[in-house]
Image (cartoon, rainbow, N blue to C red):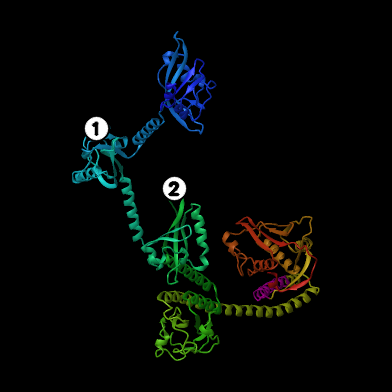
Amino acid sequence: MHFKELFDDSPVAFYTCDANGKISYYNRSAAALWGREPVVGEESWCGSLKLCSPDGSPLPKEDSPMARAAKDERLQKPFEIKIELPEGSFRNLLVYPQLKHNEKKEITGSYFTLVDISDRHKDHIKQVTLSAIEQSSDDAIVSKDLDGKITSWNAGAERIFGYTEKEALGKQITMLIPQDRLNEETYIISNIREGKKIDHIETIRLDKSGKEIPISVTVSPLKDASGKIIGASKVARDISDKLQVEEKQAMLSAIVESSDDAIVSKDLNGIIMSWNRGAEQIFGYMEEEVIGKSIKILFPKERLQEEDVIINRVINGKKIDHFETIRRHKSGREIPVSITVSPIKDSHGRIIGASKVARDISAQVESQVAMEKYIKNLEILNSVGKSISEKLDVKGILQRVTDATTDLTGAAYGACFYKNTGEKEGGLRLFTTSEYQLPSGNSVKTSHSRVFESSFIPEEVVRVDDISNHHNKIKKGFPFGISTQNSPIKSYLAVPIISKSGFLIGGLQFGHPAAGAFTEEHELMVMNIAAQAAVSLENSKLFEQVKSLSAKKDEFIALASHELKTPLTTIKGYIQVLSKLKQEGMPQHFLSRSLNQVDKLNTLVEDLLNMSRIEAGQLNFHLEVFDLKEMLHDLIDTFTYSSQTHKVVKDLGNSAAMIEGDKQRIEQAILNLLTNAIKYSPRADAIYVSLEVTENHVRLKVRDEGIGLTEDQKRQLFTRFYRAEDTTGISGLGLGLYLTKQIIDRHRGKIEVTSEYGKGSEFCFTLPMKKLETQNRLYNSNSLR
């Protein structure tokens, strides 16, 4: 009983099993290790809830080391197991097995002593872990004794300093220290002896090759089990990259501070976090005025929504490149800027704000505006030059010149003075003004009242920056009756218009309410246009003279034609009376020939009259709907009887050719084509007429096998009085085809000619088909265009 109490109270865990493995006894220390009290005689081999191998894999109790050791004396040696406690934790146990024998040396049971080695196991794991960390660390982890001898050396130390572990162990730590820094080791050891830790001192050490390496060092005391300081552990980190980053950051910081661009950072709420000198120069705010304030202080009111768009893009990780917009200076002045905005990320890659680079592009915008203005001015100059060269009326030229030069100079008003033909010497008058008005609602007078010519008399450009300062040099009431001292006009520009012969024929005047509004560039532009205007005005005068001569010519032709018609009609009447008398032989022959010549002369006079009517716009048309095919049948039948040299070969088809037009004029045009075909094919005996009808048009062709036309002749064929070369002996004034084309054109038709020189020609005209109800109307020729 004394021994049982001794075992029950023993601090050593102990239990027994019978020959079948049933637990027959356990003490309190064993129950404490198991965390429970197993039922004696019922549970086998171990009192824990769960049994595992040392590596943690489940282990059936029947196959446990205890069961195997109780059956085989060769397995009677200590072994390790892991048990699970009721609360779920694990313990590592060292088990010492021992067999129990009877007098016959038969195995009757087994004894087991348990030792808890969990803490030792944890320490082992910790040591293994620390060793693994030490060996895998990129930092140099070195230990040394108090004499400075190296006692441990990890892979990180090999990488940083270049020495292998074998080369470093037992050597003095001073082999890593430059000569000028040996005092640092004395300082470190003295602190270690006092039990002080040295944190993150930045210094220089040497690698195996002698190269200096910037490092950050942390040194801690090493103690033995009794707490005595026996050495030091040293963790050294290569900070070359860090220094490079710091140098780079310092360089970037210097660049930011010296940049002429505004470089600003803000958080995701738009609060300004940094502000460089460039931002101060561009926006006028000092750094202390804006840090912590919203970036929106730089935004015009109408552009506040831009910040929301920018922040949304930044939050989504998107960059904004060279966005041109407007921002506000501290003074309220608006500044055109080009901004680039990029997301700012923290060390974990999270977007925490935005960096903004803003460049003042005022100069570029002004340059662009100037370039656009220059291009616009060139376009105006080109347009003006082209338009006034095409115009032949004085009013149109001067109005275009006045409007264009007023626009080019930016004047508040512009006016043009011109000496009309027939004016007395020195008679310049206000001819036209621009569409602009003087300031304060004073509109420019447009009457032809005389104004002062003093600006133009020297025949040089006059430019005054402020006429109020020159009132003694400028006549009272100049210009337009406005007092120079109280005038709303300050800037004044006058440019004379000089003819090619050197005479003053006009001038341009401009005014502006701002002083110094006109420049030398404005002078040059206006002088250029004035020179072009002078040429165009002289051309206009020549044109007017030509028109006058042409009108007189047309008047003469009309008068002469009418005067010729009267005696011709009388002569023809007398000859017709004579021809009806019974005369034979030669007298009748002469009468027939005379009538024929009178008809020819009558046709020529009629052609001249028609041409005159066309030129005067008085050739009227009596419109009616008729079948062109029927008219052709009648016309060709009549023409066949009258022609003694040629036959007409016709192909008029089977379809009706309904058109709307003047039947007499159309017949006249066709007769001209038939007559020409015969006249210009003297060696042939036939001409060919064909008619085609399409859905929308009718097409008439007249072909001959005559002398043909050259390319140059075809280009001039339909002009007035044109007579092709090599047509000597063929009568006519050269008006037939001109009149034919005018008739076809004014019926909304088209006439063409194809020809090969020496082989004949084919004339073809097309007219629109008539699909509406028949109408008879009298139209002026202009109404048919």
Q: Which residue is mark 2?
A: 348
Crowd class of label 1 (few under 14; some 14 to 19; many from 20; radius 10 Å): few
Q: Position of residue 385 (x, y in %)?
A: 50, 71
Q: Amino acid at mark 2?
A: His
The one of 402 and 345 positioned closer to us in this rendering = 345
- Res 425 visible: no
Magenta segment: 593-617
**Sequence-wise, which precedes: disc 1 or disc 2?**
1
Q: Position of residue 190 (x, y in %)?
A: 22, 44
Q: Amino acid at mark 1?
A: Glu
Question: In which quadrant of the rendered view does residue 738 lie?
Answer: bottom right
Contact (Cβ within 8 Å) of mark 1 with mark 2: no
Q: How many marks?
A: 2
Magenta span main SS: helix
Give me the residue at 52% from left, 19% from top.
22
* Residue closest to the far top: 104
Q: Position of residue 292 (x, y in %)?
A: 43, 63
**Is disc 2 placed on a helix, strand or loop?**
loop
Magenta-span inclusion, residue 598: yes
